[in-house]
Amino acid sequence: MHPILIQIYGFKLYTYGLFVAIGFMTAIWISKKNARSHDISDQTITDVFFIILVSALVGARFLYVLINFDAYKNNWLDIFKIWNGGLVFFGGFLAAVIVTAVYLKMRNLNIWKIADIISPGAAFGHAMGRIGCFFAGCCYGKECDLPIAVKFTNPESLAPIGVYLHPTQLYSVLSNMILFFILLWLQKRKKFNGMVFLSYIMLYSLFRSIIEFFRGDFRGTFFFNFISMSQGIGFFVFVIALIIILKRSNLFYGPKEK
C-alpha cells in the first residue's frame, strides 16, 4: 500500500498517523453529538478524549514494545516512532480505562454514563485507525489464496512484500463498523448505565479473538503458543464484562445499579 501518503522536500505525511488522527477527531465528533442528548457538555467530552488519547497511546505503545522487545532493546529511540505503526489496542484500552476512570471519579462524573456515550464513537474511530494500519502494512495477515487476499509491494510497508495475505486490517475495519451500528442500536435500548460500554468491550474481544487467528505478525504468546497476548487479555476482559453485566442487570445477584 502507501505507508507515506505525501513526501515533499523532506516532509513526510504518514498514512497511518493521518488515519489515526481522523479516527480520533471523528470519535470526538460522534461522542459530542451523543452527549448533547444526555446533558453532558462538549467540553467534558473534549477533556475525556484528551485523557484517553495520552493514556491510550502510552499504553498501546508500551504493550507493543513489550511484546516485540527484541526489536527495540538496541534501538531505544525507535520506541517513540509510533508513526511507523506498532500499537496494541488492549494495551491502550486498559491504560485509558484506568486513567479515565480516575479522572472522572475526581470530577464526580458518572463513569458508566460517560463510557456509554463515547463507546459508539470509539468503535467508529477505531475503524478509521485500522484503515491506517492497512496502508502502513502493520497488523498483517497470514498467507492465503483467497480472492480477497492482498499483496503489499511498497518496500516501506511493514508487511511481507510480494505475497498474498489475509487483509486482516480490513477485517478489523468491518468488525468495528458492525460494532458501531450495534452500539448505536443498544444506546436507545439500554437497561442500565454501562450496558453499551460493557457490550462494546465484550463484542470487540470476541471479534478481535477471531481475527487474531488470521494474523501473520508476531503478537506474543499467551497459552502454549496457541493464543496470542491480545486473545488472552480479550478472554479475561470478556469474562469480567459479562460478570458485571449480569450483576448490573440483576441477573446474577444484587439489585440493579444505575
Image (spheres, rainbow, N blue to C red):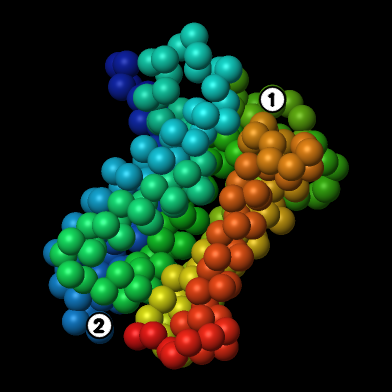
The picture places residue 176, in percent across and down from the top left corner, at 54, 61
Numbered disc 2: secondary structure:
loop
Quarter of the image with the C terminus is: bottom left
Residue at screen point 59% across, 50% down: 233
In the rendered view, tell whether residue 220 sits above or below residue 124: above
In the rendered view, tell whether residue 181 sits above or below residue 101: below
Q: Amino acid at mark 1?
A: Ile
* Farthest-out residue, top: 74
The picture places residue 33, in percent across and down from the top left corner, at 27, 74
Q: Decide which of 8, 102 is in the foreground and name it.
A: 102
Query: Which residue is labeled 1 in the image?
Result: 161
Q: Residues within 10 Å of mark 1 (few under 14, many from 20)?
A: some
Q: Is residue 150 left or right of residue 111?
A: right
Residue at screen point 51% across, 33% down: 64
Q: CA distance from mark 2 to mark 1?
A: 49 Å
Q: Earlier in the sequence, mark 2 or mark 1?
A: 2
Residue at screen point 56% across, 59% down: 237
Q: Amino acid at mark 2?
A: His
Q: Is residue 236 left or right of residue 3?
A: right
Residue at screen point 41% across, 61% down: 122
Looking at the rendered structure, which numbered label has been put on residue 74? Answer: none
* Farthest-out residue, right: 145
Numbered disc 1: secondary structure:
loop
Quarter of the image with the N terminus is: top right
The picture places residue 217, in percent across and down from the top left corner, at 67, 33
The picture places residue 202, in percent across and down from the top left corner, at 57, 67
Q: Residues within 10 Å of mark 2 (few under 14, many from 20)?
A: few
Rendered image quadrant of residue 222:
top right
Front position among marks 2 and 1: 2
How many numbered marks appear?
2
Please say whether residue 185 is visible from this viewpoint. Answer: no
Query: Which residue is labeled 2 in the image?
Result: 38
